[in-house]
Every structure is written in structure tokens, then in C-alpha cells.
Image: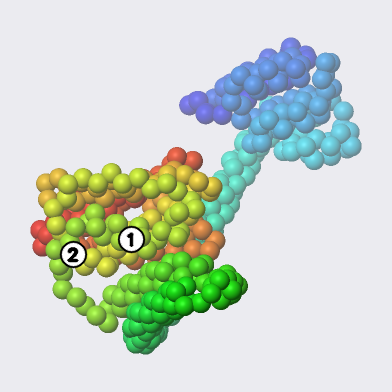
Amino acid sequence: MAPNKETLLIVDDEPPIRQLLQRWLSQEGYRCLTAENGQEALDRLDDQRVDLLLTDINMPVMTGIELISTARRSQRDLAIIMVTAVDDREIAMKALELGAFGYVLKPFERLEVLLHVTNALRLRALEMEHRRHHHGLVELFLERTRALKESYTRLEQMDIHLRRSEQLAGLGQLTAGIAHELNTPVAFVGGNCRHLEKYVGRLQDYTAELEQLIENSCDDNGRQAAHALRGAFKIDFIAGDTASLFAEIREGIDRITELVHGVKDFSRLERPAKVEACINDIIDKALAISHNELKYKATVTREYGAIPPCRCFPRQLGQVFMNILVNAAQAIEKRGEITIATGEEAGIIRVAVTDTGCGIPEELLPRIFEPFFSSKEEGTGLGLAISRDIVREHGGAIEADSRPGSGTTITVLLPRDPEDGPAS
């Protein structure tokens, strides 16, 4: 007879019984192992794969019930048949509860044993197939559930993206209108500030002439009274502070004017032609505008190389570098350093901004240029996305390299002439 694939373990403390069962089952093609007690059987189970356990109930060292209980914990798919000389219903029920397929009473017939073994192995195969099928269905269900959840998440993100795009479109129109409306009052305030500065200068000159007249025309009492009045009204402090106040007002007006121009460029109400500009100068302007954000967080080091002029939209690139610089400052927890290195090679201008901040986790790094993605709770997730689009519009590329705890480097690559093609 052709050999079967199944391996059987026969456990009985009586050698004649073991030998008889081994002979019968070997003749049917089964591979048979034997053990004279429960502990020896467990050792065999640890060493070899066994498909069916044929065990006596009453044995020294370890009972058949104890053997079944222990074996079941380690081998879930093991088929079990009991052999007993006592028809004890309670023991039989206990064995069945532990997973035995059935039991054979001594003395037994050869055919009876073969039928029990064949049925037990067949039931074992059916149970294993059912388990595999069930497991496959569960895996399929989980896979389909995951795919459905991912699809729902993508649809939800697309819906959010569309809603935000509509909001941004409306916001762009609104900010363009605000920028346009701000132009007039900003120009009005700037013009009046210049006139006011001249008027204050004339008043200061007039006051100086009056004091000189008092000094020349009055007696000591009059001069002392005039000096007392000058001190009481803090004329010296006002005269010294007025110049710095006007300087701060002019700086504020200039910054508002620059921001208005930036908003106009962003909303594309004005579409200037590309001009020749120096990237180093654009970065300097971005540093000046973002000075308030940087001064408390980082020391900025400029490592500028000799760069030829680049055909570009200067204000748009200024927005790119401002976004990068502000992100770098926000990544620094207390105080750190920001290094800006520029250079040019083979017609490609390279700008690398490196900070000593907290860095970006590896799994988030590919997503930092996605719209609306932000690793900061207060972030909008638009700064780097807009920067990427602006750089691409210039035929360039933007890259990020970061390690948690080791800072981040954002590199911008720009062709000198965008018509030369994208930077690689």
C-alpha cells in the first residue's frame, strides 16, 4: 500500500498494545511513532510534527487526560483518539471536551481502529480547511474594509480640499480687494507723514529761535523760567524722540507697502514680467520682512556665493524664502541657528536654508509640500505648498532633508533662465 503522509503517535504503557497498533497502522501506510508514557509523548510532540495522537487513558507518570490537555495547548490541529479498557462516560466526556475525536474500547478490532483513525484524520482535514477558509474570508473582509476606509478618507480629503480651494479662491479675491483698498490710505498716510515730519522740524526750529531770543532779551529770572518750562514739558526728550518715531513710522509704512505688493502678486491682480534680479538681494529682503519672526529664535548666518542675475518674479521668490525662513524659526524650540548658503553651478542657482530645529519624522517628510498638510497645530499647511508651486513655475525644484532632532535643510534649485528647463 502506498504510504500516507500522516504521522501517528501511539502512547500506551503496555508494549504489546503499542506494537499491535503500530503494526496495523503501518500496514495501512501511516508513519507511526510510539511512547510508553505521557512525558515521553510530549517530548516526541516537541521534536516532530504529528497529525494524530492515539493514547491510552490510564498510564503512569501522566494520565491520558493530562497528556491531551497539555498537547492541545501546543498543537491546535492535533487529532486525538483515546484508547481505554473502562467504558467511563465521565472520562469520555472530559476527553471530548478537550478536543478528542472519539475513543476505542479495549479489546478492539483492527477494522474498528482503522475506521476511528481514518474518520479522525478526515475530520481534522475538514476542520483545518474550514479554519483556512474562515481565515481567508476574515482577511478578505479586513482588506475590503481597509480599502473602503481608504477610499472614504480620500473622498473626504478631496471634499475638504475642494471646499478649501473654494474658500481660498474667495479669500484671494477678498485679499486682492483689500490690497487695492489699502494702497490709497497707505499712500495718504505716507505723504502726510512726510509733511508732518517737515512741520515738526519747522516747529523745532521755531522753538530754538524763541529760546535764543529769550536768552538774549530776558533777565536771569526770565531765562530760568524759560528753562523750567522746557524741562516741565520735556522738550529735550520730545525733540530727541521725534526723529526715531518718524523713522519707525516710515519703516512701518514701507513694510505695509511691501506686504500689499506681495498680496497683489499672490492674488495675481498684477502680473509683472520677469526681470533680472539677484537671488542674494531677494533673500536679504525676505530676511528684513521676517526679521521680527527670526530675531527671538535664531542667529542667521549668510554664506552667499557669487551668483549671476536670474530671470524671475522677485516678489514671488521673496515669498518662497520668507515661508522657508519662518518655518525654520518655528521649528526651533528656544534659540538656534539658521544658515543660508547660496551658489551656482552649470546654470543652476542653489539656495540651501538649514536650521537647528526639531527636524521632521521620516514618515512625514514626503508630505510637507502637500496642500493643507502641517506638522504644527496652528499651521495652515499652505506655505510650503505655495512655495513649491512658485519654484516650479520658475522651472525649478524644491527639496527637503531632515532627521528628527538634527534640524532640516530646504534646498531651492533655480535655473538662471527658466526657459532652459526645470532644475534637476
- Which residue is under mark 1? 286
Q: Which of label 1 and label 2 is nearer to you?
A: 1
Name the residue at 49% across, 63% down.
379
Question: Along the polypeptide, which appears first: circle 1 or circle 2?
Answer: 1
Residue type indicated by callout 1? Ala
- Which residue is under mark 2? 312
* Residue 316 located left or right of residue 295: left
From what the image shows, is residue 32 above or below residue 117? above
* Residue 11 located left or right of residue 236: right
Here the colouring is: rainbow
Q: Secondary structure at mark 2?
A: strand
201 and 39: which is toward the camera = 201
From what the image shows, is residue 71 above or below residue 423? above
Q: Quadrant of residue 60?
A: top right
Q: Residue furthest top?
A: 15
Residue 97: give x, y in percent of width and height: 80, 40
